[in-house]
Amino acid sequence: MSEAEALMFVAARTRVPVPEVFSAYTIGDVGFILMRKVEGELLSSCIESMTPEGRRVAADQLKMYVRAWRILGSTFLGSVEGGPCPDILFNHPWDYKSTKRFGPFDTLEQYNLGLVKVLRSSRSKSIWYEKEEALKEKILSSTAERTSLIPLGALTHGDLHMGNIIIKDGSITGIVDWGEAGYSLPEREFFAAKRIALDDSWLEMFNHAVPCLPDKYELMDEVDRSMMRYSPI
């Protein structure tokens, strides 16, 4: 239901090409969305056959669309409809079987305290060394650096990769799979895309399209890698 809310919100507030939602419902714990099919092929299927100029055109389009949804800000950090924060840092593989969710967060301080909680949860009770303590302090100290951040969160797709971008006749006709969308810190979009990117052509495209805040990205990346040290992935 959160994904359906995000799709309808983006469609109503921007010109980003997303699937039209006809209906959304749940049966038990399983959610379903009935939506219009987007014509075209996945960027992952055609990126290697695209000319450099074609990739630049698509990258410019993507940049325009990313900018359009990023300006939709919020005073909280969480899913579009006000639910828990969908950031990968709060939903790591080690926590797959847990029903605990974090957020929404009304302040950056709450968000960072949540990060510290999940960092501690990623270790057993016997594992909390100096490096974990140092990272905890780094997370908490970053709060003061952004107390004037207004609005607090930027709308974020959260799972931007070649398999979620549809191309037809050289143009982007759809950006799909908004299941991890929500209001998050400005660096999350770049971080979420970079952490799973392997293809050089795609790296070049999203480096052009998605703003990177290097120092903020580095902290998010450090927290992510620290959590993964004790997870299956």
Image (cartoon, rainbow, N blue to C red):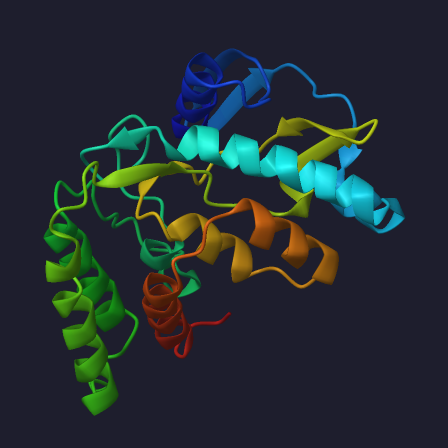
Q: Residue at x 47, y 53 (%)?
A: 190
Is 128 on the left-hand or right-hand side of 215? left
Residue extending farthest to the right is 49
Does residue 175 sit above or below 37 in this rendering?
Answer: below
Looking at the rendering, which quadrant does residue 207 occupy?
Answer: bottom right
Report whether residue 196 is seen: yes
Report whether residue 125 is seen: no
Which image quadrant: the N terminus? top left
- Residue 10, x across and y down, in percent: 45, 22
Q: Residue at x 28, y 77 (%)?
A: 123
- Residue 11, x across and y down, in percent: 49, 16
Looking at the rendering, which quadrant does residue 106 occupy?
Answer: top left
Is 121 on the left-hand or right-hand side of 189? left
Does residue 177 sit above or below 142 in this rendering?
Answer: above
- Residue 2, x across and y down, in percent: 39, 28
Residue extending farthest to the top is 22
Q: Residue at x 65, y 27 (%)?
A: 174
Q: Residue at x 71, y 32 (%)?
A: 166
Is 190 on the left-hand or right-hand side of 85? right
| Total residue callouts | 0
